[in-house]
Amino acid sequence: MAYNKENYARIREEYAHKNLRAKEAAEGRLRELHMIHPELEKIDRVLSETGFNILRAAMQGKEGLDERIAALKEENLSLQEARAAYLESIGYPADYTAVKYECNTCSDTGFVGTKMCDCLKRALILAGYESSGIGNLIRTQSFDTFKLDYYSRSPEEQSNMEMILSACKEYARSFNGKNGENLFFCGTTGLGKTHLSTAIAKTVIENGFDVVYDTAQNILSDFEFERFGRSYGDNTESRTDKYFDCDLLIIDDLGTEMTNQFTVSCLYNIINTRINHSKSMLISTNLAQNEIRERYSDRITSRLFGDFMVMRFVGKDIRLQKLADN
């Protein structure tokens, strides 16, 4: 798995501070009670000497060691019970001075041994939603919310969308970030291309991979900024590196961008570089094949229809169907 590097570094740092804050808060509560209730401080002082007493008992030799250890444990347990009772007698819960972690499984470290804790995985997944560019869409668009009812005008239309949905689910489920498999969604507007793109992104992110999702217009605008808008000596982070580095790049609405020699060159560079490095892509467009050929170079067209699994969406605009239903 390859979670977004920036997200991973930021969240790991957050966990380090979270663990430390929990310990400092517990120490603060303990100091406060010690100042107000000296009797509690006396009990804690005796409890803190348990480890030393066990070591001293061990140095007295093996004979009778088990009995001495057992006696110390019994004394320690009795003191803990007395401590809990005292806290409750002065109006505090028995665990008031204990460290309160958000996740008791990993003690807010993010790991259980060398294994990543589920809480850290959830945090990375949520961050992945936001950094992917489709944080809002993911909340409503998934495989579970994709309805085949809108493709029932004919058996052929229904069968085609059943095949596409099944293929998309399998693509997302088996995605490993290494095989460079690409999808190309074609079809007029309102047929579910964005919905299935989002559903794939959601599953891939949840499986621990880095996804970048944006429109062709926004992506190529970033390349224009890097080429023409960045001032001399500007060392800020590149806007375009993510399009080459991520595990899955999703380019939505190909054909809505301003097309010129520069943008076509950038588009070819993205597609060709990712293909050469076995980096997966999903590209969607409302353009027909002949319109793609007229608008882009043969080098781009041949890659889109040669190195991508082409899925042709057919049917009636779902938005219009929903309006008719209302």
Image (spheres, helix red, strand yellow):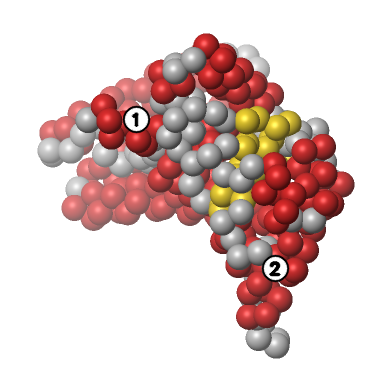
Image location (x, y in percent) of residue 19? 47, 47
Near-viewer residue (5 or 161): 161
Q: Are marks 1 and 2 in contact (CB under 8 Å)?
A: no
Residue type marked 2: Asn
SS for callout 2: loop
Task: Kindly give the residue lying farthest to the bottom in the view shown.
Answer: 232
Quadrant of residue 238 within the rendered picture: bottom right
What residue sits 18% from the left and 38% below the top? Answer: 92
Marker disc for residue 321: 1
Residue sitting at x 52%, y 11%: 155
Image quarter where the N terminus lies is: top right
Residue 78 % position (x, y): 32, 23
- Residue denoted by label 2: 260
Drawn side of residue 37 relative to residue 200, left or right: left
Image quadrant occupied by the C terminus: top left
Q: Tag 1: residue type? A: Gln
Relative to 90, is 214 on the left or the right? right
Whole-percent x, y for residue 85 in the image: 20, 28
- Indicate which disc, 1 or 2, sits on the residue closer to the N terminus: 2
Q: Is residue 116 visible?
A: no
Label 1 sits on a secondary structure element that is helix
Please state which of residues 23 and 78 is positioned toward the viewer in this rendering. 23
CA distance separating discs 1 and 2: 36 Å
Residue depicted at 26% across the width and 27% down the height: 325
